[in-house]
Image (tube, rainbow, N blue to C red):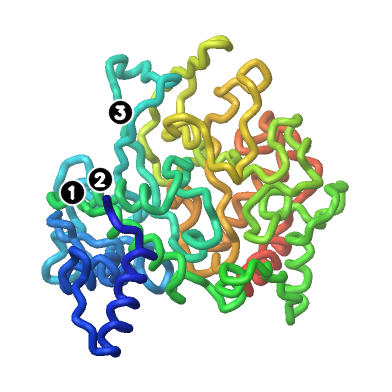
Amino acid sequence: MARTLRQLAAVSIAMLVAISSGSDVTLQGLGQDELSIELDGKKLFEKETFGGNGRTCSTCHSKQTGTLTLDDVQQIIDKADPDKFLIDDALDDDGVGTTRVQAHGTIRMTIPLPPWLSMADDPGATHVTVFRGIPSTRNTPALDPILLYDGRSPTLQEQALGAIHDHNKNTVEPTTVQLDAIAEFQRTDPHFFSSPALRKFAATGAPPELPPGITPAQKRGRTFLVDAPFSPPSKKGICALCHSGPMLNTINQAHSNFANGRPRPGVRFFNIGVNIVNAPNNPIRTWIINDGVNPAVTIQSPDLGLLLHPTLALHPSHPPLPPLAILPRAVLAENFKIPTLWGVKDTAPYFHDNGAKTLRDAVAHYQRFFNSTPAQDPVGSETLGGRITLTDDDVDDIVAYLKLL
């Protein structure tokens, strides 16, 4: 039976105690090299390829940002030997070019189709390919149990294993102990936190507080993030509608009914119309959603997000989904994980498709979302559109404040 990380740590501590007392000790079935490798999550994350294509976890999750920025991509391409990166999911569809990854930093992901999805443009398909950015590992491993843009991985270990299989193309299977070590490294190493306050939150459970702001712009920007009742034409708290809670990544508890009662307190997925913009010009597919209870729905979209989750049985920290008779699964189409805003200034590009290249681009997207209804602009919000007006000055103030987080 595979030893857990804590068990292995106990072995090493016991060995040190025995050595200091002069006792003759063994590693209880583990050699020294094996023990050091299996306990070294840092080495596994930064150096271990598992006999694959040369990639490691840190190839796509840098220390500086936890993700893959466009500058990171260019630096890799400019290296004399970029082969470990320019393979398979990073290349253009011609198998040669690098236009997409250089322009957008997205990679090709092939995902099994769950039973409620089929492709009208490829009826026999069992998998679908979508193009997504790489979620940042800053703050998430220790503080956010919902992983990936569609929530498919229930644990850090399973997320790491999926990446090793899909992106490293391993020939050596990682052990349970190694996956535990990788997960523990991500939960505890300082560079996985955007600030000491977030690291303290992980250690003690004391949530960070929103900074007060120094400049007038920052202080004005803060008003958009405070939890407040949505009371048009006031714009106070509008960002907190979805960026609430200690991690600024959940629906505001006071606004469980702000979208026709569908989202409920604490939910971590929402649709803000990013796919409608489709800034990277990703391929549009024709999807058929048939949940077995409600009439089948056909949707044209580059990516259905949450509906690609294999079971829709989300993490226990996420409220359970209502029954199909109340919430048809088609309603969840194009819902993506609400990201934390802590450390957001360092994690560009933004959105699941990396469609916003700068923080200002990301905030400016909400001008279309808030300022219009779908009849006026397809990105407009059905229930919030037109009830407030987000100005260019508002966008500047919000950006100024987000840079403090």
Give how far across and how far down residue 286 sits, in percent: 41, 22
Circle 2 SS class: helix
Q: In this view, does 187 lie above or below 269?
A: below
| Structural crowding at the residue carrying mark 2, measured as other residues with C-alpha within 10 Å and reported as few (<14), some (14–19) or many (≥20) | some
Which residue is label 1 attached to?
169
Q: In this view, does 251 lie above or below 275?
A: below
Which label sits on residue 257?
none
Q: Is residue 205 above or below residue 172?
A: below
Give percent across and percent down for residue 192. Answer: 45, 69
Residue at the disc numbered 2:
166
Where does the image place residue 66, in percent across and percent down from the top left?
A: 41, 65
Q: Label 3, secondary structure: give it.
A: strand
Q: Is mark 1 on a helix, strand or loop?
A: loop
Residue occupying image coordinates x 32% and y 61%: 60
For the residues bearing labels 1 and 2, Cβ distance under 8 angstroms: yes
Residue depicted at 71% across the width and 32% down the height: 382
On screen, residue 86 versus residue 279, left or right, reads left
The answer to whether any part of residue 393 appears in the image is yes
Measured Cα–Cα span from mark 1 to mark 3: 18 Å
Using the numbered discs, state the Cα–Cα distance from disc 3 to disc 2 in whole angstroms: 13 Å
Q: Nearer the viewer, residue 23 or 248?
A: 23
